[in-house]
Image: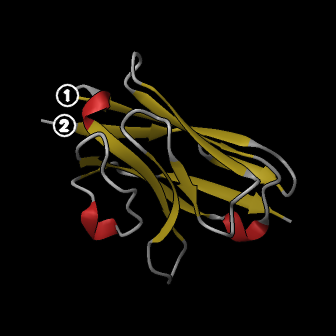
Amino acid sequence: QVQLVESGGGLVQAGDSLRLSCRVSGRSLNNFAMCWFRQAPGQEREFVATISRGGGRTDYSDSVKDRFTISRDNDRNTIYLQMNSLRPDDTAVYYCAAKRTILTAPLERRPSNYDYWGQGTQVTVSS
């Protein structure tokens, strides 16, 4: 079956950087559009960034645009989230998600549109 495993979270200070990884197994990554979501305590799961199957299209939430970069390496079956200029309000559990889709499908922001999920990795940003 398809499995997603996130890594790279941790405790950092405001202004620092982190890079999250999400490795997909069980099926080739190039079958999926991919997305990062996050969820802070007591809040709903929030869209962060998404990338198309081929990697040529991306979309970001306004809160992370110009600070975070999503990328993918289909040969390594891994996607990444480079997070720069981290702020305390970026503190959350970060989840990657995969959506079976065609190459030309529009990018999706809603969690309900994704088929597979990882277990999450905690990111904590101290002030």
Q: Where is residue 96 in the image (x, y as percent from the top left)?
A: 41, 49
Q: How far apart are marks 2 and 1 (CA)?
A: 6 Å
**Farthest top residue in view:** 75
- Residue ID at (24%, 34%): 31
Crowd rating for badge 1 (residues with CA inside 10 Å; few <14, some 14–19, many 20+):
few
**Farthest left residue in view:** 1
Q: In this view, does 102 lie to the left or right of 14?
A: left
Residue position for label 2: 2
Name the amino acid type tagged 1: Arg
**Is label 2 in a helix, a strand or a loop?**
loop
Q: Mark 2 and 1 residues: CB-CB less than 8 Å, in contact?
A: yes
Whichever of labels 2 and 1 marks the residue nearer the N terminus, that label is 2
Nearer the observer, 19 or 53:
53
Q: In this view, does 79 lie to the left or right of 126?
A: left
- Residue ID at (43%, 28%): 78
Quadrant position of the N terminus in the picture = top left
Nearer the observer, 50 or 27:
50
Residue position for label 1: 27
- Residue ID at (37%, 38%): 5
Q: Where is residue 63 in the image (x, y as percent from the top left)?
A: 69, 69
- Examine the rendered structure and indicate whether residue 107 appears above or below residue 63: above
Q: Which quadrant of the structure image shows residue 103?
A: top left
Crowd rating for badge 2 (residues with CA inside 10 Å; few <14, some 14–19, many 20+):
some
